[in-house]
Image: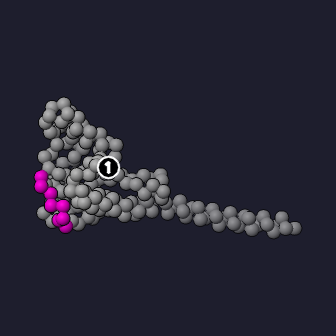
Amino acid sequence: MQKSILYPILYISLSISGLSVAIAAIDNTVMPTQTYVSYKLAIISQMYKQDAESEGFGDIPILVEYGTSELQAALALEQDYYDRTQMSCNVGFDILWHSQDPDYAQDKQITMTDTGLVKVSLTQGRDIYYELVCDNTNYKNNNRCQIDDVIFSEDISLKAYLFEQCR
């Protein structure tokens, strides 16, 4: 007799559980995008804070630390080029601050564009855009977004520039 009462309750419980799973699955398709906006803004904010505190002289170059493996490869090409030729193939200024002599204390505004790029507006009048990628499969545990590219000066991609100029 207890079995017959238990089965309907179990069935109802599974149905409710099934509904919860369906809602969670629908929610997971939207939630990462909203969550990633926060992660992306926080990553860029953290990166600028860290770079300002070290005045650009951290143990690891900041874009290497925060970059994807593809961006790291482009930055490695720059170093390899210098090691081979003793000449620089870089853009000639600090990318984060768009300056040869950065004012690390300057104000900046960090926002998200409609196209999903993170925009950093510096008080010196320059805008720098960051393309970030985030881990889709494990966002709740990883909370990790990485910079995949930097767009500066008239839509120039840092990655494309380095891959082209530093071969």
**Spot occupied by residue 9 in the image (x, y as percentages of width and height):** 75, 68
- Please tell me which residue lies in front, 33 or 48: 48
Residue at x-position 55% and y-position 64% = 23
Number of numbered tags placed on the structure image: 1
Q: Helix, strand, or loop for circle 1? A: helix
In this figure, which residue is indicated by the disc labeled 1? Answer: 65
- Please tell me which residue lies in front, 68 or 117: 68
Q: Quadrant of residue 30?
A: bottom left
- Please tell me which residue lies in front, 56 or 5: 56
Crowd around label 1: few <14 · some 14–19 · many ≥20 (10 Å): some
Say whether residue 24 is left or right of residue 92.
right
Most extreme residue toward the top, as rendered? Answer: 84
**Spot occupied by residue 55 in the image (x, y as percentages of width and height):** 21, 56
Q: State which quarter of the image contains the C terminus.
A: top left
Most extreme residue toward the right, as rendered? Answer: 1
- The image shows residue 59, relative to residue 41, as above or below, that is above
Residue at x-position 26% and y-position 52% = 58
**Spot occupied by residue 157 in the image (x, y as percentages of width and height):** 22, 47
Given the image, on which type of amino acid does mark 1 rest?
Glu
Q: Quadrant of residue 108?
A: bottom left
Say whether residue 54 is left or right of residue 99.
right
Q: Is residue 6 magenta?
A: no
Q: Is residue 93 visible?
A: yes
Q: State which quarter of the image contains the N terminus.
A: bottom right
Colour setup of the view: one colour
Say whether residue 57 is left or right of residue 19.
left
Q: Which residues are magenta?
A: 100-107
Q: Is residue 148 visible?
A: no
Q: Main secondary structure of the magenta part?
A: loop
**Spot occupied by residue 144 in the image (x, y as percentages of width and height):** 40, 54
